[in-house]
Structures are given as C-alpha cells and as structure tokens.
Image (cartoon, grey):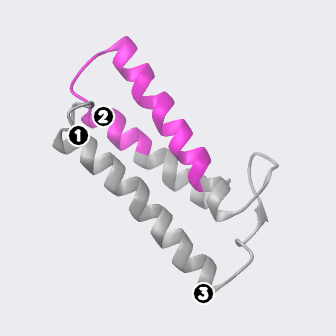
C-alpha cells in the first residue's frame, strides 16, 4: 500500500516531528488565540506558525547544502537545523 515511497525510520521521524509540532501549535492557538505576533530580528511581524515555517524551510536548506558539500553523516546539519529553529522561535 505504501510502496510508492521509500519509507524508512528517519523519514517517519521527520514527518512525525512536523505533525507533532503542528499539533503543539494548534493546542497553543486554542489556549491563547492570536498567534503571539511579534517583530523580530529580521524586521518581520511573525506568528508562531510563521516562525515554524521559516525554521522548517531553513532546515531543509541546511540539509540540502550539507548534502551538496559534504554528504553523509547528517548529525552536524541536524544540530545546525535545531540551532536555526531555536533562533527562529527566539529572535525572528
């Protein structure tokens, strides 16, 4: 049934992480509506969802650049992506 994609545990963990973060943001939005808008370091007015999108997009670019320049293993870009995500939610 799911043979159209090479499902591996790392792939499953990526999707589980994305959907889990969306679920957490949904719960936060229900508890405190409005998205917690703020102006960050980039000069953008962002909500929690915007910051999640920016962090996911940046993380994808970090992994693609790492694969293009260095290849595997991917532990270092994972750390860089987590640092980028924390920066996005802290300062953006």
Q: Which residue is mark 2?
A: 76
Q: Which residues are magenta?
A: 52-81
Q: Which residue is mark 1?
A: 2
* Residue at position x 39%, y 64% in the image: 20
Q: x, y (%) of residue 18?
A: 42, 54
Work out whether residue 7 or residue 41 is closer to the camera in this orientation and state it. 7
Picture layout, residue 70 above or below residue 19: above
Residue at the outermost bottom position: 31
Residue 31 is tagged as 3
For mark 3, does the 10 Å Cα neighbourhood hold few (<14), some (14 to 19), or many (20 or more) residues? few
For mark 1, does the 10 Å Cα neighbourhood hold few (<14), some (14 to 19), or many (20 or more) residues? few
* Residue at position x 41%, y 39% in the image: 80
Separation of marks 2 and 3 at Cα, in angstroms: 35 Å
For mark 2, does the 10 Å Cα neighbourhood hold few (<14), some (14 to 19), or many (20 or more) residues? few
* Residue at position x 23%, y 22% in the image: 72
**Nearest-to-viewer mark from 2 and 1:** 1
Q: In what element is the residue under mark 2?
A: helix
């Amino acid at each position: 049934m799911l043979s159209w994609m090479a499902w591996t545990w790392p792939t499953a963990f990526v999707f589980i992480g994305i959907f889990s973060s969306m679920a957490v943001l949904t719960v936060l939005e229900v508890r405190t509506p409005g998205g917690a808008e703020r102006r960050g370091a980039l000069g953008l007015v962002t909500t929690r969802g915007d910051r999640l999108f920016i962090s996911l997009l940046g993380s994808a670019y970090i992994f693609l650049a790492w694969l293009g320049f260095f290849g595997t293993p991917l532990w270092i870009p994972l750390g860089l992506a987590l640092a980028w995500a924390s920066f996005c939610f802290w300062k953006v």
